[in-house]
Image: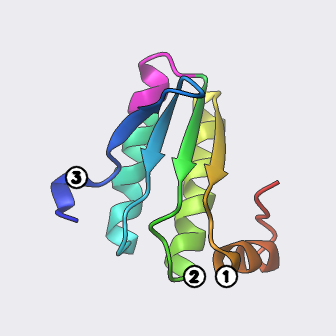
């Protein structure tokens, strides 16, 4: 995915919530860009944003860092963030790091 498309937002018609798509491959340099996209969504009036993690087929510490920073960004903005479509490996790694998705 070209760098200019990181964090493309779409609206989930079933839920009427903005969806922040986390692209792959993901690097540490991408994490601040994703957090900025999330801040923009909250600044535009969103109260809850869904982060779609489906593209992250490789569970690694960059993915863990991204989830942790997105959650922190949401909390600081006074919003809520839900993660969806995380693979089993990423879920297990998040649990190990104390960042479970529930």
**Is 15 above or below relative to 30?**
above
Residue 99 in percent (x, y) is at: 76, 64
Q: Secondary structure at mark 1?
A: helix
Quick one: label 1 or label 2, which is nearer the N terminus? 2
Asked if the stretch drawn in magenta spans residue 42, the answer is yes
Question: What distance separates the C-alpha of mark 1 from that of mark 2?
Answer: 5 Å
Question: What distance separates the C-alpha of mark 3 from that of mark 1?
Answer: 25 Å
> What segment is highlighted magenta in the picture?
40-46
Q: Is residue 17 left or right of residue 38?
A: right
Residue 46 in percent (x, y) is at: 53, 22
What is the quadrant of the C terminus in the image?
A: bottom right
Instruction: Name the residue carrying label 1.
Output: 89
Which is nearer the eye, 71 or 51? 51
Q: Is residue 10 left or right of residue 3?
A: right
- Residue lying at the far front in this picture: please name it: 14
Count of numbered circles on the image:
3
Q: Is residue 95 left or right of residue 7?
A: right
Instruction: Name the residue carrying label 3.
Output: 5
Q: Residues within 10 Å of mark 2 (few under 14, many from 20)?
A: some
Dots 1, 2 in contact, CB < 8 A: yes
Q: Is residue 54 left or right of residue 84?
A: left
Which is nearer the eye, 89 or 46? 89
Q: Residue at image x 40%, y 51%?
A: 34
Quick one: label 3 or label 1, which is nearer the N terminus? 3
Q: Residues within 10 Å of mark 1 (few under 14, many from 20)?
A: some
Specify the quadrant of the image occupied by residue 41: top left
Q: Residue at image x 29%, y 55%?
A: 6
């Amino acid at each position: 995915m070209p760098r200019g498309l990181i964090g493309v937002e779409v609206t989930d018609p079933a839920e009427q919530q903005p969806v922040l798509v986390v692209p792959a491959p993901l690097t540490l340099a991408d994490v601040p860009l994703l957090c900025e996209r999330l801040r923009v969504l909250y600044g535009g009036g969103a109260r809850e944003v869904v982060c779609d993690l489906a593209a992250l087929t490789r569970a690694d510490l960059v993915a863990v860092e991204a989830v942790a920073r997105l959650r922190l960004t949401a909390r600081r903005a006074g919003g809520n963030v839900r993660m969806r479509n995380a693979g089993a490996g990423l879920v297990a790694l998040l649990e190990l790091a104390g960042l479970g998705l529930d």
